Image (cartoon, helix red, strand yellow):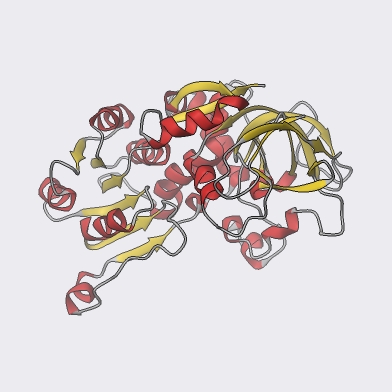
C-alpha cells in the first residue's frame, strides 16, 4: 500500500509502497478515508521525541473497518471509525476509574517486540506513530484506539475529532468544566484553539477572548464563538484580557506550546483562576515561575492537559453527533483536501498560518 514515510528526523515525508500485516488479537484493519495534518506530527518529524525511524505519522484518522482480529469485540466490519492517539489498556487503576487518558500501560495496545511489525518496508520495521499511522491507504489499529461514529458525518470532518477536537473541546468540557457565566481566554486560534472556543460557547461562557497574531484567524475565531479578539502584536494580551474582564479570566487556555504564551496565559488568569497548558512544547522548553508571596496570594492553578482529559469511546461519538446537528463547527476547520504527495507543501502552508487543517482524502 502507499504510505507517506518519514525516514529520519528532519528528512520530510516521502510516499513509498510499504507492507501492512493482517490484524491479530484486538487489532482492526481500516481503509483510511481521511487523515488530518496536525502540527504535532510535523513537530515529531523535526525534533527528537524518542521515536524510532522510519515512521509513518498521521494521527487524525477516520475510515471504514475492513477486517478485525479474532479477539475484537467493540467494532465490526463496515463500521465508520475515528482513531485517537490516546492508547489505554483497560485494566489499570486509571482505566478502571474511567480515566483512560491517564492509563499507566498504554503500550499494551502495541505488538510485542518479538511479533512481526504491523508495518514494514523492504523487511525493515516501520514505527507507527502513536499506534495509528494514518498517512497511508490503510491502518492497523488496536480497537481501544478507535471510536465508532455517526455515519452522517463526512470522513474529512470526522478525522479532526480524534485530536484537534478532543484536545481543544475536551480541555474546556472535561478538564476545566467551564460553566455558564465563566470567562475564558484562548491563546492560539489554530484547530485546537478554535475547538476550545467553540466548546466554551457551548458551555455558556460569558466572555470568550481569542488571542493570536494573525487578524484573519482572529476574524474566524468570532465565527466559532469568540466574543472578543486580541492581536498580541498590536497590544499586550495580558493587559487586554484584564481590561476586558476586570481582572483576568476564570480559565486561560494556551494552545500553542510556546513558553512566552504559556507565561501570558498564567498571568491572564484571575486570582483563583486556572491556566491550562494544552499546546505541545519542544523538547526541553521551560517556563520560569516567580514563587514569591505575590504568586501564592493569587491562588492560581496551573494545569497541564493531555488530549482534553478525553474518554475517546464516550467523547468522540458525542462530538460527531454535535457536528451532525451543527453545534460543533468541525467542518469549517477543513481548509483543503489533499493527496499523500501533497503533505510536505501543505505542512509549509500550515507553518505559515495560511491554512487551518489540510486533510488527506485522495489516495
* Residue 62 sits in quarter: top right
The front one of 99 and 350 is 350
Give the percent coordinates (x, y) of residue 264. 24, 56
Q: Is 327 drawn above or below residue 188 in the view shown?
A: above
Q: How many marks?
A: 0
Give the percent coordinates (x, y) of residue 194. 37, 36
The front one of 355 and 122 is 122
Give the percent coordinates (x, y) of residue 228. 19, 37
Determine the residue located farthest toward the right in the rendered image. 70
Give the percent coordinates (x, y) of residue 339. 60, 22
| Residue appearing at x 82%, y 59% in the figure | 113
Task: Let me know if residue 155 appears in the view.
Answer: no
| Residue appearing at x 30%, y 27% in the figure | 220
The front one of 158 and 37 is 37
Determine the residue located farthest toward the bottom in the rendered image. 293
Task: Let me know if residue 24 appears in the view.
Answer: yes
Amino acid at each position: 500500500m502507499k504510505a507517506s514515510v518519514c525516514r529520519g528526523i528532519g528528512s520530510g515525508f516521502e510516499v513509498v509502497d510499504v507492507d501492512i500485516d493482517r490484524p491479530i488479537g484486538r487489532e482492526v484493519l481500516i481503509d483510511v478515508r481521511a487523515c488530518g495534518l496536525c502540527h504535532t506530527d510535523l513537530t515529531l518529524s523535526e525534533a527528537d521525541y524518542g521515536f524510532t525511524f522510519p515512521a509513518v505519522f498521521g494521527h487524525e484518522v477516520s475510515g471504514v473497518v475492513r477486517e478485525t482480529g479474532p479477539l475484537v469485540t467493540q467494532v465490526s466490519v463496515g463500521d465508520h471509525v475515528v482513531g485517537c492517539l490516546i492508547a489505554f489498556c483497560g485494566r489499570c487503576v486509571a482505566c478502571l476509574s474511567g480515566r483512560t487518558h491517564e492509563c499507566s500501560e498504554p503500550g499494551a495496545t502495541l505488538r510485542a517486540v518479538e511479533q512481526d511489525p504491523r508495518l514494514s518496508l523492504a523487511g525493515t520495521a516501520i514505527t507507527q506513530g502513536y499506534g495509528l499511522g494514518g498517512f497511508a491507504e490503510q491502518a492497523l489499529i488496536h480497537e481501544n484506539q478507535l471510536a465508532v461514529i455517526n455515519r452522517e458525518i463526512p470522513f474529512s470532518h470526522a478525522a479532526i475529532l480524534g485530536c484537534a477536537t478532543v484536545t481543544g473541546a475536551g480541555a474546556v468540557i472535561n478538564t476545566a468544566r467551564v460553566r455558564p457565566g465563566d470567562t475564558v481566554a484562548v491563546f492560539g486560534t489554530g484547530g485546537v484553539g478554535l475547538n476550545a472556543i467553540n466548546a466554551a460557547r457551548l458551555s455558556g461562557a460569558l466572555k470568550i477572548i481569542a488571542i493570536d497574531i494573525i487578524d484573519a484567524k482572529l476574524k474566524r475565531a468570532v465565527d466559532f464563538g469568540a466574543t472578543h479578539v486580541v492581536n498580541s502584536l498590536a497590544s499586550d494580551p495580558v493587559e487586554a484580557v484584564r481590561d476586558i474582564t476586570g481582572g483576568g479570566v476564570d480559565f486561560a487556555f494556551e494552545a500553542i506550546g510556546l513558553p512566552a504564551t504559556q507565561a501570558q496565559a498564567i498571568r491572564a488568569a484571575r486570582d483563583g483562576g486556572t491556566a491550562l497548558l494544552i499546546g505541545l512544547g519542544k523538547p526541553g522548553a521551560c517556563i520560569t515561575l516567580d514563587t514569591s508571596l505575590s504568586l501564592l496570594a493569587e491562588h492560581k492553578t496551573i494545569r497541564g492537559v493531555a488530549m482534553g482529559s478525553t474518554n475517546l469511546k464516550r467523547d468522540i461519538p458525542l462530538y460527531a453527533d454535535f457536528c451532525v446537528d451543527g453545534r460543533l463547527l468541525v467542518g469549517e476547520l477543513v481548509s483543503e483536501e489533499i493527496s499523500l504527495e501533497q503533505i510536505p507543501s501543505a505542512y509549509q502552508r500550515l507553518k505559515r498560518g495560511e491554512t487551518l487543517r489540510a486533510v488527506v482524502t485522495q489516495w
